[in-house]
Amino acid sequence: MKENFDVTGMSCSACSSHVEKSVSKVDGVTKVSVNLLTNSMQVEFDEKTTDTGMIIKAVEDAGYGAAVKQEHSAAKGNAEKETGVKKDPVLAMKRRLIISIIFWIPLMYVSMGHMLYEALGIAGPVFEQKYLYGDENAITYAFTQILLLVPILIANQKYFKNGFKTLAKKAPNMDTLVALGATAAIVYGVFAIYRIGYGLGHGDMMVVMQYRHDLYFESAGTILTLITVGKYLETKSKGKTSEAITKLMNLAPKTVTVVRDEKETVIPAADVVLGDIFLIKPGEAVAVDGVVIEGESSFDESAITGESMPVSKKAGDKLVSASINKSGFIRARATKVGEDTTIEQIIRLVEEASSSKAPIARLADKIAGIFVPVVISIAVVTAIIWLLCGTGVEAALSSAIAVLVISCPCALGLATPVAIMVGTGKGAENGILIKSGEALETAHLVDTVVLDKNGTITGGRRSRREDRSSRTWRSLEKCQSGNCSRWREAWKRAANIRLRRLW
């Protein structure tokens, strides 16, 4: 049995790797494929030994959420778009990014603005010199940075929740690296404030001067802001790669006119049941597969079959969902509804292809799965080596944070899934259905392509091209107008013929 699930809480390729490992350990599961871009999971399992509840529990034990994927029909997709029920992840991430940048810029100015003035050899604003900078204002300087950092922390609290949650489950991910790096900087900054307070209380200005420059609050803000920039770009790329499926969903109408109890009623396309009599007026698209019971017309099926010429339909002929009625009035009976319609099967194929993994993607996931623990170990070793070299806690902490932050494995885990999803999506837009990521990866080995009928590789639309006769007549017209009189006279003499006006 094959079942699809929605998975929540994943933020990087290490997350998808942990989910995959956890579910694959469930008895009866034969194949697991987790897609980070679509936050989905496809599982093949023996329903005699396991069920969806056991699979969901395995995902939850790994620190993530899961639910059986609901019916994803074109009609429902249109309804979500119409009512605005579906949340826009790009908009939410954009808000987080804007909040982060708004407070990060003044945070950087407060923490490092005086360095800019010193480098330029000019004095800063009097207000800043009097109330912010200087050893005597060290506490004000520190708490101003904390006030600017707090909104950034609130906007990006998800990194800390996910990061420490997965760490507690012994399945650290990219958020763990970010959370550890930012937390280390904040903890050391708080420690520095206590040292500043000690120095001010005991008149030890050397301690105050030393720790005033080692607050590291701006480092925490920079870590969170830069990672959010990357997350925003990543979220935008996810949205673009799913546009092909959205376009397919928009081919089918969201409502349909049915005849019930001798009355015509407009209902959502998702509510049509087998045997319903429905009407298709000229210019309307077919909502569900059916058979014509009354009327004659021609239908444009180019979006489904690639056939450029309209296809005539009469009583007894089959109708394909998403085809367009060109002329007559048609009464039809529904033979396939919901996920059984032609357009829904195409959408499902595209979704399954985009969710499947190519062999190279599985290799990348294996590397990403061990990448985070290795990076954390390297960061700890780095800090220990710096401490043993006698450079002090500040240098050791700074080096460890640098290792944690720059070692993001997202590019490794996202490159292949993005390529597969874009490839299958672009293929769907052009009428080419790719059934799996593995098929796409091995397509370069194909040396022979067999086409079953005319129109398979055409655009599905007729177009007029200029022919030779048109160019010939224009050439004669130019000659008649005198533009090529020398050529005409030479041709007459060579052919020994007499030209006569034809018009």
Image (cartoon, helix red, strand yellow):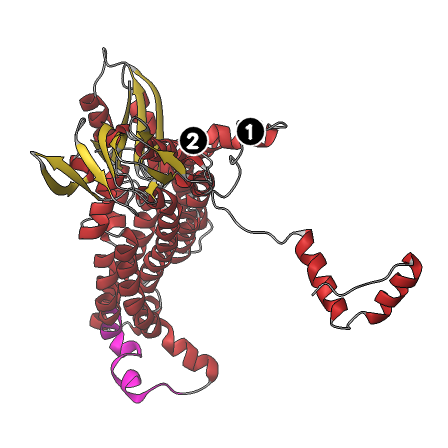
Query: Residue 470 in the image: x percent, y percent?
Result: 66, 56
370 or 53: nearer the eye? 53
Q: Which is closer to the viewer, label 2 or label 1?
A: 1
Instruction: Pick the quarter of the image with the N terminus.
Output: top left
Tell me if 476 is positioned left or right of 73 in this view. Answer: right
Which numbered marker is on residue 357?
A: 2
Which residue is pictured at 24% across the width and 68% down the height? 148
In the displayed image of the protein, which residue is found farthest to the left? 261
Query: Residue 409 in the image: x percent, y percent?
Result: 43, 43
Residue 340 is drawn in which quadrant?
Answer: top left
Q: Give the SS element for disc 2.
A: loop
Tell me which amino acid carries mark 1: Leu
Query: Residue 297 in the image: x percent, y percent?
Result: 33, 39
Tell me if 308 is positioned left or right of 373 in this view. Answer: right
Q: For label 2, count other residues whose C-alpha is less than 10 Å away and answer few (under 14), some (14-19) or many (20+).
A: many
Which numbered marker is on residue 13?
A: none
* Residue 124 shown in magenta: yes
Residue range corresponding to the magenta coloring: 123-142
Q: What residue did someone put label 1 on?
A: 451
Residue 287 is drawn in which quadrant?
Answer: top left
* Residue 274 shown in magenta: no
Which residue is pictured at 17% across the width and 51% down the height? 83
